[in-house]
Image (cartoon, grey):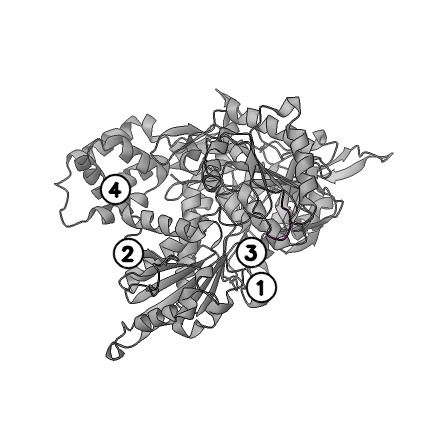
Amino acid sequence: MLSQEARDLQNNAVSDLVEVSQQKKYITFKAPTGSGKTHMMADMMNRVLEADPNVVFLASTLSRAELGKQNYDKFAQLASEGSFPNLKPYLVKSEYADEEKPHIPIGYNCYILPVDLYKKGSLLFQTGAMEGFLLSITDSVEQGGLAKHIYLIVDESHRETKNLNNLKGYFKKWFNFSATPKIERGQDPDVEITVQDAVEARLIKSLILNDPPHATVSDAIDRFRHIKAEYQKHHITDYGPNGTERGVNPCLLIQISNKHKADQEIEDILRVLKQPANKDLHWMKIVAKDKKSDSQLESDTNDRIKLAPIAEWKEAAKQSNSTIDIIIFKLVISEGWDIPRACMLYQVRDSHSKQLDEQVIGRVRRNPCLSNFSQLSEEAQALVTKAWVWGIAEQKDIHNVSLWQDSQPITSNIKVRTTRLTNDLATKKDFHQTMTKILGSSQMPSANKSIFELYQKFGKADTDIQTEGIAYATDYQKWFTFTENLGDITKAKNQYVHNYEISMVATEEEKDLVATETFPEHSAFQDNGNHLRIKEWVWRRDDGDKDFSFDSEAEQKWAKLLDDIQDDFIKHVDIDVEGQAKQKQIYLWGKNFVQDSEIKFEYYLDGSHFSYPDFVMMDHHDRIHIFEVKSVNKSAKFHTLDGEEYEAKLQELKNAYLRASAVTQQIFYLPILFGDNWTIYQYLDGQQHQLTEELFKEFLAKPPANHQ
């Protein structure tokens, strides 16, 4: 069961896709590997088909790694279980009997085409079967056609599809889906889920890059041993296909070169793996032979899987509880192979392709525990949302940052009290009494509603409500009753959780001991543009540069404001800096980079969410200030929240920060940029104040009035 944040992120992205498709013919969707592109693709098709049954989708996929079959199976599963019942998928096949002419049947509305099946020399190309199929769909009824519109989806659109380009006259809409779209081919994203979005929603792992930058394969294996032990220590599990719990065995991927260097690289790697200290590790070498060279690169393993046909190795190795610890590969898993348990990548090969690097990194970024993430301990959650990567020289858009070496003056001053919601419904006696009353007075379930319609309704409920439903529904009759009363049950929950005066409490480290959080020692940010050269705040870039990037123009402008006023209003500390005879003056403010951050505040909006505020600051009166920066300026792109949803989230943050200011005795802000001007909502001691930029500075200048 996905977290509410992850579900909202995907749902809003699909809403944006559907909206922009009503305005444009060519649409590009960018989302990182592991964020659920296949699921969102199915959702988009289902919504479009529900609104317009006259549409037929043709989804082109890579042929590598049976990606077409993988997508077909996913679409068929989602359709059959009722999540997206409008889908009627069909997988275009490649095998035909002798002298059999290729034929694509009509009657479906979602055709999956492995792109290599339509290229020069293929049967679909030579016989004209594909064009004949497209004509039968698009021709008028008078001409013997179905008079339908074909929408093309190009999955992994960064790869060229020249032969499909020749058929573009048949396509009413053209959707590009990719983690790395080709801007130079006009694939400028119309809708985008950023890496930061996906990391915050815990859909994908955050990256720890070059750790350290010149580590050997032996260093990587030693680090892997430590991580493997941590996975076992914290009992990390997920659910298998039949719903049974199983342990998650992490995996290290080692990528070797694609040319003549590969033989020597494999020899060096195996020499390390065969050392006595590593004999308990199970490895698999899976490399496709090059017909012209690399004759020694046959696949091999020291695992019992060796008894099975090689064709089955990859499928077995991707299972969460696979006994394979280390996989050595060339390019064979750059795309089309999901292995969420992989959490480490060591790249031996000298890559010159940033795009390829991003695709390979995507193999280790998937969250292996999406279905049960909320049930894991905090330590386990932290483990399954981190990936360690060595050797990616081209990842220039991700920058590691650290607190200054002498971080104690920073961390001892910046101590943030966070909040959480006591929204565990299982412990709420009053809620269960209300729910029992609702279900007990319910009329006989309506026979007019299909199980698919009810399943969709149940799937849209927040995760806490779904958990209650699963516990209650011991038979089909109870499940129908529960689902038909979801609206009233959700309202009952809202009464208990949404009232922050009752539900919001300070996070406890132990019973009756309030926890405090500070900036992590190390973090990272992705270069999203919006650059600003910061003078001296709590962070330093590991590469020595002082140029930082921010997620939005509004964030950049607020950072500039704080940077400009730090001499007058922000507390500074003197720290020891390695290699310098004198101390350095550091101002106590910084960006709350999400990676490894525990500075977060829980709020409720159709489910529980965490707000990771953008900036934290200590003023020269020792007060903690917390900023969540927003903007109402229109963007040129669609950004996963429409106007009404954005306003709803903004209002909910106001409500949450209002109460958090009373619970934690910290000062919260929602600075909202409109044009070039700021409207600043301040939350102090449970009271809201509206400030201008000048009033904000005046407040900082005044000593606190009995405020700690």
**Which residue is under mark 2?**
86
User: Marks 2/3: CA distance?
Assistant: 29 Å
Sooner in the amino-acid sequence: mark 4 or mark 1: 1
SS at mark 1 in the image: helix
Three-letter code, disc 2: Asn
Is 392 in front, or is 587? Answer: 392
Q: Position of residue 468 (x, y in %)?
A: 29, 33
Q: Position of residue 131 (x, y in %)?
A: 38, 71
User: Marks 3/1: CA distance?
Assistant: 9 Å
User: Marks 2/1: CA distance?
Assistant: 33 Å
Image position of 225 with respect to 329: above or below: above
Sooner in the amino-acid sequence: mark 2 or mark 3: 2
For the residues bearing labels 2 and 1, Cβ distance under 8 angstroms: no
Q: Residue, x 63% and y 34% (percent of image)?
A: 520
* 559 relative to 232 in the view: left or right: right
Point out the stretch of residues depicted in magenta: 291-295
For the residues bearing labels 4 and 1, Cβ distance under 8 angstroms: no
